Image: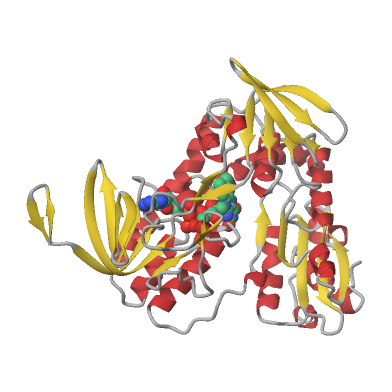
Amino acid sequence: MRLVNGKITPMKKYQTIVIGSGPGGYVAAIRLAQLGKSVAIVERFQDHVGGVCLNEGCIPTKALINSAKFFDSAKEAEISAVELKAGIPDMAKMVSAALNTSAQLRNGIKYLFKKNNIDLIVGNARIASKNSLIVTNNGKDDEFLADNFIIATGSRPKVLASLEADEKNVLTSDGVFKLKQTPKALLIIGGGAIGVEFGSLFNSFGSNVTIVELEEQLLPLEDKEIAIEMTKYLKKRGIEIFTKSQVLELQRKPNSRIAKIKTNNETIEKEFEYVLVCVGRSPNTENLGLEKIGLTLEKGFIKVNEKMQTSVDNIYAIGDCINSPMLAHVASVEGILAAEIIAGLKSEPIDYSSIPSVVYSQFEAASVGLTEELAREKGLDVVICKHFFKSCPKALLLHKDDGFVKIIADKKTFKIIGVHIAGIGASELIHEFVLAKANNLRLQDIAKTTHAHPSLSEIVVDAAKSVFDKPIHG
Ligand code: FAD
């Protein structure tokens, strides 16, 4: 019992309360409910189930990329002897269409909550003690009790104080969804996956795009050859790219910014209508009461063991707020694992080496496992093969035959150490290699399966075969 507005109110108790309704939190909640647990999920924002992924991340960006593809198709149709007119991109309408897709998916998740008897509590949560949680909404506090908590509070765009992201002319990824027009000149600071995806889609909308990346290569986490291939493609489309470069200063003008960019060999000044800051994300771990209950943090991330358990044994953490790859599908598998451990199942730890990652630009890149650089650093005995899309009939008939599949395999067993794809369909093709890697299959196991003709997936067979034998095409 507790006193609320002068009245005695019973405190509601659940077996588990999940904090945050992103792809980590909502998936964990559903899994817990499936396993018979009573569950509530707390989300601080109204109409924000699905978290960053669904509302400002994966989904609306890919919907915009889909819009961008129509503009590309109009330009490319000529190669297939078709005349199409692209028209003028209407940013406000395209953003609205993208956000409609998000709304549709949000409703789907809310339906799943109802179906699984999961209570959705709106408000800002903070942990008061090992078993109690305070949720604040409109200045009113409510307390809830639980045997277990799962923290799935996600992350937010990292902002550099010197760049003053005001969401007017200097945007974070969140600000893109407030744009009413396509930028004429856009500077993207940070050439990771998010920066490259935005660069590629605004280029399709007709913006003059410049990307500045601090590291030696674009997509610093990807295999070097993939990064080179992506750079080549983006440059061919007219995107200006500076690597090993830094934006030193943004000089404010009424409707633009003048950027001082220190490149490899000189310092230049250039005016941009908009600047988009894509320099990474910070975990949401502040103001959650974590220090008070003695929960261990490392560099701002919540520390967990391989069961997703924090230093406080009944509290688990998953997704972007822990130090694992900041990807929606990673958050979801971590959510499932945490839920299953809480429910007493003996589920296996996550095999992070078999997690795919994808760059969804117009020209896609996808990977699983180690890069060549990391495999060599580890001194592994590897065989490396590249197989080109030019040898794939389907890629050729679609006039999208740039790029390759690169396989790094163990020299003796022909088991996958890493696969990196740059080219059409990479986001789908990678999963055949993920399946093989996660199940310890050999490349021969892939190569002996029959793939339909003509399909892009034929390249998977030929690429696998090229490692231990001769492919038919190539
Ligand atoms: P989040 O999705 O961040 O959700 C956390 C939720 O917790 C939020 O709704 C937040 O409001 C809520 N919350 C926070 N604090 C509290 C509190 N105290 N009380 C109550 N609620 C709280 N990943 C991919 O895998 N593929 C992609 O294509 C992809 N594209 C992306 C594109 C962009 C532009 C961005 C920004 C990200 C992208 N990501 C992508 C990353 C992906 O969005 C994140 O990895 C994923 O959303 C993390 O999920 P999560 O559940 O950990 O947290």
x and y percentages locating residue 197 in the rendered image: 66, 45
- Residue furthest left as drawn: 7
Q: Quadrant of the N terminus?
A: bottom left
Residue at 50% in and 57% down: 321
Q: Who is closer to the viewer here, 50 or 431? A: 50
x and y percentages locating residue 125 in the rendered image: 33, 53
Is 389 above or below relative to 433? Answer: above
Residue at 32% in and 66% down: 130
Q: Judge whether residue 454 can be spotted in this image.
A: no
Side of 330 where 340 appears, left or right: left
Residue 149 figure quarter: bottom left
Q: Judge whether residue 281 can be spotted in this image.
A: yes
Side of 241 where 21 appears, left or right: left
Q: Who is closer to the viewer here, 168 or 265? A: 265
Is 245 above or below relative to 222? Answer: above
Is 357 above or below relative to 81? Answer: below
